[in-house]
Amino acid sequence: MSVLQIDNRDGALWVTFNRPEQFNSLSPESMCAMIDMWQRAEQDDSIRLVVLTGAGEQAFCAGADLKLIGCDEVKRQVTDRPSRYR
């Protein structure tokens, strides 16, 4: 299961956080996927807008997964990526 579901619908990029059992909190994998998605959206002129949504019925996104705050793996995965979105 992908942590982000991405669907291009006629120029609208629908991005669904897909960790409903963790209230769609952001894991290192989902943070990196978000960086990739924003870069893709910026480079593709056919994408006019990005819609963010969350899977499940309880939460859109709880923010960062608190179990991972300060974790070296998070820092490594996010900061080792070349990106202007840091």
Image: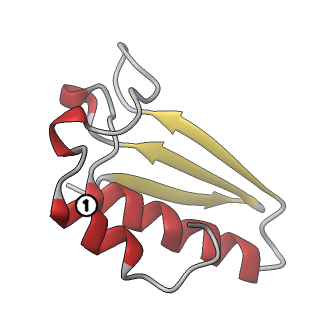
Within the image, what quadrant is residue 58 found in?
A: top left
Side of 5 relative to 69 (left or right):
right
Name the foreground residue: 32 vs 46.
32
> Tell me, what colour scheme is on the image?
secondary structure
31 above or below 47? above
Side of 26 relative to 84 (left or right):
left
Residue 18: give x, y in percent of width and height: 33, 42
61 above or below 73? above
Q: Quadrant of the C terminus?
A: bottom right
SS at circle 1: helix
Which residue is tagged 1? 74
Residue at (39, 58) in percent of width and height: 31
**Residue, far top:** 58
Side of 38 relative to 11 (left or right):
left
Residue at (77, 67) in percent of width and height: 47
Residue 70: give x, y in percent of width and height: 23, 49
Q: Quadrant of the N terminus?
A: bottom left
79 above or below 11? below
Name the foreground residue: 46 vs 36.
36
Residue 29: give x, y in percent of width and height: 28, 62
Q: How many marks?
A: 1
Residue 61: give x, y in percent of width and height: 43, 30
Name the foreground residue: 85 vs 33.
85
Within the image, what quadrant is residue 81 found in?
A: bottom left
Amino acid at pointer 1:
Val
Q: Residues within 10 Å of mark 1 (few under 14, many from 20)?
A: some
Residue at (37, 69) in percent of width and height: 78
29 above or below 70? below
